């Protein structure tokens, strides 16, 4: 008889919102593949099953990877239609050969050399935001002062988006995240839809401007990217692609920074230990990605009847691959509930995905986090959490990270 444990999947409510890992452990033990009726998808919680799905694009399609898990009402669809909104994303939500073409074109414009060349600028920007944190004095919020503004600055400058539009873009990104919350009040749903629509219209105008007046930015490079025998990226593809890059470059990196500082400071002595040996930053970041990844999971859809961990799934079944659970799988990681910055196997996590859909922005996120931690450890060796402060989380299926993180320093 199928397990009913999926009925207890309530990631947008306490206590799972703040700490989902005990529930994930139950899933892995009792029902590694189980249906969650509230979201109309199947939960896949074990590392091996997640890897099996990620490696098999033929049987497990990415085409609907970012489609909202709930059916949008006609009034919401009408708002989105005005902006030619589509839940199809050519980088994350597509399969070969279409995905192969887009990934190749993106690789022409956004490669490792381009990311590496950003290091001096990221260091300068991170230092300026750290100055702003210090000026706020004791009890400053790390998220709103540094972890949020820095990635937004980096990705908007990279794309060539004007500084004056950053706050508006942040709001539009917040609006889009609301689509992944079932039972959203109607007035919030309408506001979120209008924000998502305005976001698309803004990007479309920006792309058309670049067609007429090219600049030295990533958006222009994406427009100019060419592969032999392949058509270039269309405006519609570039709009969706820009959305993906904005979320990956801003939301994911903000959550990685916030989560890293949170766990280092929650474990007494780890911040001071790392400040004396900053060469350990790289592995620390991999352990954070394993222990509490900023991307909880990703969707796939079966293209034919399949079996996972003895569970039969029909064609067309939507699967939610729980990266955050797979990264705690006892079959691969010893004492997975222990945060260990020196863990030798930390880099085996699936926090950035795996296979053909491995996160294209992973090198940039790692670079920003590495540089920011280096500067913070050097300038604030006695950093600590403000005692007694709660750490709130945004209710969201895909993204995970603290919304506020108040810190203090000094003797």
Image: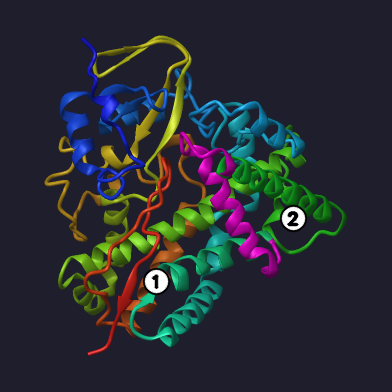
Q: Is residue 185 magenta?
A: yes
Residue at the limit of the structure toward the bottom, as seen here:
411
Q: Is residue 153 covered in magenta?
A: no
The image quadrant where one finds the C terminus is: bottom left
Q: Quadrant of residue 340?
A: bottom left
Q: Which residue is mark 2?
A: 220
Q: Nearer the viewer, residue 294 or 60?
A: 294
Measuring from the top left, give residue 365's x and y in whole percent: 46, 58
Foreground: disc 2 or disc 1: 1
Viewer-closest of 295 and 171? 171
Residue 287, horizontal then vertical, whole percent: 26, 55
Q: Main secondary structure of the magenta part?
A: helix
Q: Quadrant of residue 286?
A: bottom left
Q: Secondary structure at mark 1?
A: helix
Q: Is residue 117 above or below residue 92?
A: below
Q: Which mark is residue 330?
A: none
Residue shown at 45% from the left, 58% from the top:
253
Residue 163 vertical placement versus 228 (above, below): below
Upstream in sequence: badge 2 or badge 1: 1
Q: Which stretch is magenta? A: 160-187
User: Badge 2: how crowded within 10 Å, few (<14), some, or many (20+)?
Assistant: some
| Residue 107 percent across, percent down from the top left | 60, 47
Toward the viewer: 316 or 406? Answer: 406
How many numbered discs sit on the rendered protein?
2
Residue pointed to by mark 1: 142
Quarter of the image where one finds residue 272: bottom left
Residue 344, position as x, y percentages in the image: 20, 53
Quarter of the rendering occupied by the N terminus: top left
Horizontal side of residue 194 vs 277, given as left or right = right
Is there CB contact under 8 Å for labels 2 and 1? Answer: no
Measured in 3D between alpha carbons, the distance from the residue under mark 2 to the one under mark 1, in whole angstroms, is 33 Å
Q: Is residue 338 left or right of residue 233?
A: left
């Amino acid at each position: 008889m199928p397990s009913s444990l999926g009925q207890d999947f309530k990631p947008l409510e306490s206590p799972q919102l703040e700490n989902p890992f005990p529930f994930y452990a139950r899933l892995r033990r009792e029902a590694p593949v189980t249906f969650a009726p509230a979201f109309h998808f199947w939960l896949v919680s074990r590392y091996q099953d997640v890897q099996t799905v990620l490696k098999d694009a033929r049987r497990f399609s990415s085409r609907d990877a970012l489609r909202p898990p709930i059916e949008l009402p006609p009034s919401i669809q009408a708002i989105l239609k005005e902006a030619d909104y589509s839940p199809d994303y050519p980088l994350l939500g597509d399969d070969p050969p279409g995905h192969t073409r887009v990934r190749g074109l993106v690789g022409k414009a956004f490669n490792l050399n381009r990311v590496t060349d950003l290091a001096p600028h990221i260091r300068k920007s991170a230092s300026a935001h750290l100055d702003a944190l210090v000026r706020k004095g004791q009890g400053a919020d790390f998220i709103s002062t540094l972890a949020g503004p820095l990635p937004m600055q980096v990705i908007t400058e990279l794309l060539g988006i004007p500084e004056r539009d950053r706050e508006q873009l942040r709001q539009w990104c917040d609006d889009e995240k609301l689509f992944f919350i079932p039972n959203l009040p109607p007035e919030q749903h309408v506001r979120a839809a209008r924000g998502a629509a305005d976001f698309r219209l803004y990007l479309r105008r920006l792309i058309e401007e670049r067609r007429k007046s090219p600049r030295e930015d990533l958006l222009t490079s994406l427009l100019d990217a060419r592969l032999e025998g392949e058509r270039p990226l269309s405006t519609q593809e570039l709009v969706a692609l820009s959305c993906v890059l904005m979320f990956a470059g801003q939301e994911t990196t903000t959550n990685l920074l916030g989560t890293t500082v949170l766990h280092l400071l929650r474990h007494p002595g780890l911040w001071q230990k790392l400040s004396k040996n900053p060469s350990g930053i790289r592995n620390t970041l991999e352990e954070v990605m394993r222990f509490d990844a900023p991307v909880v999971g990703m969707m796939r859809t079966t293209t034919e009847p399949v079996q996972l961990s003895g569970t039969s799934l029909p064609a067309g079944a939507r699967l939610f691959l729980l990266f955050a659970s797979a990264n705690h799988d006892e079959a691969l990681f010893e004492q997975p509930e222990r945060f260990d910055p020196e863990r030798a196997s930390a880099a085996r996590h699936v926090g950035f995905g795996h296979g053909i859909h491995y996160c294209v922005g992973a090198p940039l996120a790692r670079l920003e986090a590495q540089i920011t931690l280096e500067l913070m450890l050097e300038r604030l060796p006695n950093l600590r959490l403000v005692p007694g402060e709660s750490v709130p989380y945004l209710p969201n299926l895909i993204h995970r990270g603290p919304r506020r993180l108040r810190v203090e320093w000094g003797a």
